[in-house]
C-alpha cells in the first residue's frame, strides 16, 4: 500500500501567489514525512485559485523535492495532445523519472468555452489524445489519423488502412542531419521521457467507459474522491483487466478520499466540514481501520489523501499529514 | 544596459552528447549561477521534434528554475507561439508568472521549420497572421475581465482565463527573432519589445532594424519597447583560448545544426546535409559573433548600445553544454564586461 496526497490551490482568502506557495509548502512537508506521492490536479473556474497548468506546477514541485513521486491529473481534451506529450516528457526528465501521468476525461461545459474542441467532442478528443501521447513517448516515428487529429499534417503514411502507422525501417538509415528537406511523413516527439517504457499512466475513472478504457489499455486507475460506488468501480476495473488477460500487478489502483487525522477523534470530526461521503476522518486508529476496510473492499494499492479540507488551517493540515505518515502509513502492510 | 545569459536548449548534439536529465539539472544550476554573477535574465530556447532532444516545453523548465532563484528574469526565447493554443498558453504563462513572482518576460517567436507546424497538424503558411492574432489574444486575456475576439484563426466570446498573471497586464511581450523589415515595423507599431537575433547579421542590418522599429513606434504613437540583441559570444583572456572555443565548440555545433536544419541549399535547391569548412556561410557567421578578450567584447557591445540596444543577450551557450567552459566565460563576462556598462548608468 502506498499513500500519497492530492493537493490543489483552493485556499480561501488569499491571492493566487500565496495559494501556490502554500501548496508548495505542503509538498515539502509531505516529502519530509516520507509519504509516497504528491498529486496535482488540473482545476479551472475559480478566479483566484485555479490551477490550469498542472504540468508547470508539477515542475515547481520537482524543483522542491528529490525523491517523492509526482502525479498530475491533466484534462487531455483541453490542450493539444502533442503539447501535453512534450511537456510531460520534459517534466519526467526534470524530476528524474518520478512522474505519474494521470489523464482526466472530465471538465464541465464552461471549461470548454474557448477550448480548441467543442464540448460534444470531448470524449473523442480524450481518447485520441491518450493514444497520441502514449505513442509520442514510445515511438521513434509515427503518423496518426483520427476524427480530430491528422499528424503530421501532410503525411502520406495513412494511405494504408489504420489510424496509426509507425515508421518502417528502411535501410540505409539516414543520419538526422540528412533528413532536412525530406517529406515529413512520420513524426518523432522528442525528447522521450526518462522512465522506460514510459511514465505510469493513470486514468481518472469518472465513469464506466473510462474505467473500461483503463483496464483494456493496461493503464492504472484513479477513483476520484466523489465516487460513492467505489467497490463496484474497483470490481469492474479488476474484472475487465483480467478479462483482457492482464495481471493485477501490471497496474496500480489508486483511490482518492478526503482524509483528516488528529489524536482526538471527536474534535477531528467537529473541525472539518463539507467532506465527501467516503471521507476518512478521525484518530490514527480509526483512519487506519477505514483504509484497511477500503483495501479489503477494493484491492486498492495506493491511497490518495485529499487533505485540504474545509475548516482546517494550514498548520492543522500539516499536522494531519505528519500523523498520517507516522501513525497510519507505518502500520499499513507495504 | 542589461545583460541576459542564454540560450539553453537542453540539447544533446552529436558534437557533445550528454544525458538529458543531467542537462536539465545542469541548466538549473547555471541559472542559479547566472543570478549570483549578476546577469539580469536567463534565457532558454525551444524547438520541436529535434533529434538532439532540443527542449520543446520551456514554461515547465522555467517554473523549476523559478523555485531555485529569486531575482533573475526568466526568459523563454522564444516560445513558438503559433504552435500553441492561445488561451492554454496564456494560462500556463499566468501560473509560471505566479510561481516566479512576476519574473517572466516572454520572447514570442514565429517558428520557421515546416516540420514543427506539420507535427501540430498545422500549415506553415501566413504564420505572421496567426502569430499576431495570438499576441492580441494574450494581451486581452492578461488584462482585466473576460475577452472577446474575432479573428481569422481564433474567435472567442466572453471567455476569461484564471488566474490572471502576477504582473498586472501580463509579462512583457517581446517579438523574438524576426529579422525582416516588416517584422521590425510590426513590433514597433504594436509597442512590443523586439529581440534581434544578431547571429549572421551584419551590424548595419541590426541598425536598420532598430531604426525601422523606432520609426514605426513613433508613427503609431506608442512608446517603444526595449530592444534586445542576441548574439553568440566567445570570451576569454587569451586569443588562443578564444580560438579554441571557436574550433572546438562553435564551428562543430554550427556545422551539425546548419546541416540538420537544412537552411543551406546547393545550386539545385536541395538542402545541404554537410557543411564543409570552406562553405561561404562561415564568413558572415564568424563575423557576426562577439569574440575576444573582455575589452574586445566591451567594444563590440558598445557599438550595439550606441545603436540603441537596451539588452544584450550573450549567447555563450550554443548547443554544447560544456559546463566548465560556459561557466568560466559567464564569470569573465559578468566580472569584466557587465560592470563597464553599469558605470555608464546615465543610459
Image (cartoon, rainbow, N blue to C red):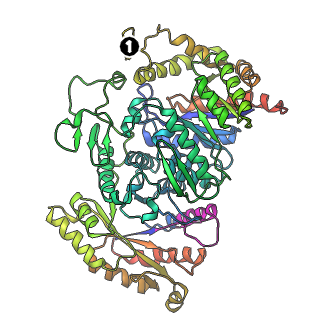
Q: Give the residue drawn at x 37%, y 48%.
A: A81
* Quadrant of the frame with the N terminus of chain A: bottom left
Residue A160 in the magenta stretch? The answer is no
Q: Residue farthest to the right?
A: B346
Residue displayed at 47% across by 29% down: B112
Whether B243 is drawn above or below A224: the answer is above
Region of the chain picked out in magenta, as a range = A6-29
Q: Residue furthest bottom?
A: A266
Q: Position of residue B68 (x, y in %)?
A: 60, 50
Q: Is residue A146 left or right of residue A311?
A: left
Instruction: In this rendered view, identify the residue nearer to me: B238 or B197.
Output: B197
Disc 1 crowd rating (10 Å Cα; few below 14, some 14-19, many 20+) is few
Q: Position of B166 compared to B7: left or right?
A: right
Q: Position of residue B102 (x, y in %)?
A: 66, 51
Determine the image quadrant of residue A152: top left
* Res B49 visible: no
Q: Nearer the viewer, residue B133 or A137?
A: B133
The verdict on residue A14 being magenta is yes
Say which of A316 and A88 sits in front. Answer: A88
Label 1: chain? B
Residue depicted at x 64% and y 14%: B239
Report if residue A247 is visible in the image: yes
* Residue A130 x, y percent position in the rendering: 31, 53
Q: Quadrant of residue A311?
A: bottom right
User: Residue B110: percent from the left, percent from the top?
Assistant: 51, 33
What kind of element bears circle 1? Answer: loop
How many discs mark residues in the rendered view?
1
Give the residue pinned by disc 1: B269
Quadrant where the C terminus of chain A sits is bottom left
Determine the image quadrant of residue A231.
bottom left
Using the image, determine if residue B132 lies above or below residue A210.
Answer: above
Amino acid at each position: 500500500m502506498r499513500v500519497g496526497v492530492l493537493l490543489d490551490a483552493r485556499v480561501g482568502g488569499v491571492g493566487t501567489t500565496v495559494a501556490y506557495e502554500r501548496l508548495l509548502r505542503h509538498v515539502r512537508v509531505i516529502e519530509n514525512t516520507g509519504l509516497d506521492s504528491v498529486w496535482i490536479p488540473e482545476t479551472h473556474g475559480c478566479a483566484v485559485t485555479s490551477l490550469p497548468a498542472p504540468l508547470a506546477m508539477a515542475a515547481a514541485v520537482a524543483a522542491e523535492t528529490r525523491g517523492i513521486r509526482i502525479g498530475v491529473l491533466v484534462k487531455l481534451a483541453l490542450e493539444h495532445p502533442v503539447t501535453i506529450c512534450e511537456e510531460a516528457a520534459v517534466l519526467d526528465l526534470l524530476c528524474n523519472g518520478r512522474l505519474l501521468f494521470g489523464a482526466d476525461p472530465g471538465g464541465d461545459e464552461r471549461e470548454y468555452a474557448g477550448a480548441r474542441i467543442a464540448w460534444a467532442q470531448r470524449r473523442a478528443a480524450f481518447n485520441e489524445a491518450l493514444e497520441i501521447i502514449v505513442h509520442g513517448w514510445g515511438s521513434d516515428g509515427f503518423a496518426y489519423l483520427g476524427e480530430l487529429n491528422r499528424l503530421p499534417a501532410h503525411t502520406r503514411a495513412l494511405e494504408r488502412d489504420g489510424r496509426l502507422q509507425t515508421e518502417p525501417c528502411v535501410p540505409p538509415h539516414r543520419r538526422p542531419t540528412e533528413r532536412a528537406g525530406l517529406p515529413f511523413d512520420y513524426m518523432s516527439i522528442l525528447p522521450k521521457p526518462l522512465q522506460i517504457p514510459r511514465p505510469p499512466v493513470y486514468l481518472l475513472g469518472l465513469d464506466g467507459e473510462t474505467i473500461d478504457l483503463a483496464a483494456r489499455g493496461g493503464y492504472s486507475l484513479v477513483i476520484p474522491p466523489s465516487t460513492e460506488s467505489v467497490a463496484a468501480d474497483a470490481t469492474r476495473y479488476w474484472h475487465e483487466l483480467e478479462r483482457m488477460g492482464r495481471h493485477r500487478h501490471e497496474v496500480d489502483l489508486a483511490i482518492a478520499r478526503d482524509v483528516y487525522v488528529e489524536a482526538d477523534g471527536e474534535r477531528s470530526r467537529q473541525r472539518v466540514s463539507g467532506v465527501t461521503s467516503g471521507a476518512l476522518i478521525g484518530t490514527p486508529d480509526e483512519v487506519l481501520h477505514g483504509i484497511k476496510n477500503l483495501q479489503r473492499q477494493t484491492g486498492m494499492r495506493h491511497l490518495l489523501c485529499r487533505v485540504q479540507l474545509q475548516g482546517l488551517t494550514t498548520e492543522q493540515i500539516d499536522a494531519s499529514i505528519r500523523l498520517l505518515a507516522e501513525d497510519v502509513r507505518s502500520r499499513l502492510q507495504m | 544596459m542589461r545583460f541576459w545569459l542564454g540560450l539553453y536548449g537542453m540539447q544533446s548534439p552529436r558534437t557533445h552528447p550528454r544525458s538529458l536529465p543531467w542537462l536539465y539539472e545542469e541548466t538549473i544550476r547555471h541559472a542559479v549561477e547566472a543570478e549570483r554573477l549578476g546577469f539580469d535574465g536567463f534565457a532558454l530556447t525551444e524547438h520541436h521534434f529535434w533529434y538532439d532532444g532540443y527542449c520543446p516545453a520551456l514554461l515547465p523548465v522555467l517554473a523549476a528554475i523559478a523555485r531555485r532563484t529569486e531575482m533573475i528574469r526568466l526568459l523563454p526565447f522564444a516560445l513558438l507561439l503559433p504552435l500553441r493554443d492561445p488561451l492554454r498558453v496564456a494560462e500556463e504563462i499566468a501560473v509560471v508568472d505566479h510561481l516566479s513572482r512576476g519574473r517572466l518576460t516572454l520572447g514570442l517567436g514565429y517558428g520557421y521549420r515546416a516540420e514543427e507546424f506539420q507535427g501540430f497538424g498545422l500549415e506553415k503558411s501566413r504564420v505572421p497572421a496567426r502569430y499576431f492574432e495570438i499576441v492580441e489574444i494574450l494581451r486581452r486575456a492578461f488584462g482585466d475581465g473576460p475577452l472577446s475576439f474575432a479573428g481569422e484563426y481564433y474567435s472567442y466570446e466572453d471567455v476569461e482565463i484564471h488566474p490572471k498573471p502576477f504582473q498586472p497586464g501580463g509579462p512583457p511581450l517581446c517579438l523574438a527573432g524576426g529579422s525582416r523589415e516588416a517584422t521590425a515595423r510590426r513590433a514597433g507599431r504594436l509597442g512590443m519589445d523586439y529581440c534581434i537575433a544578431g547571429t549572421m547579421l551584419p551590424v548595419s542590418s541590426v541598425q536598420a532594424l532598430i531604426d525601422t522599429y523606432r520609426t514605426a513606434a513613433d508613427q503609431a504613437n506608442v512608446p517603444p519597447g526595449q530592444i534586445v540583441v542576441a548574439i553568440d559570444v566567445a570570451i576569454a583572456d587569451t586569443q588562443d583560448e578564444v580560438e579554441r572555443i571557436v574550433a572546438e565548440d562553435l564551428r562543430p555545433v554550427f556545422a551539425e545544426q546548419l546541416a540538420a536544419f537544412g537552411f543551406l541549399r546547393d545550386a539545385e535547391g536541395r538542402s545541404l546535409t554537410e557543411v564543409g569548412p570552406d562553405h561561404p556561410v562561415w564568413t558572415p557567421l564568424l563575423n557576426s559573433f562577439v569574440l575576444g578578450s573582455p575589452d574586445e567584447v566591451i567594444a563590440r557591445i558598445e557599438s550595439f548600445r550606441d545603436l540603441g540596444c537596451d539588452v544584450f543577450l550573450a549567447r555563450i551557450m550554443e548547443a554544447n553544454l560544456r559546463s566548465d567552459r560556459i561557466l568560466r566565460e559567464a564569470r569573465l563576462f559578468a566580472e569584466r564586461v557587465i560592470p563597464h556598462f553599469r558605470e555608464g548608468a546615465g543610459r
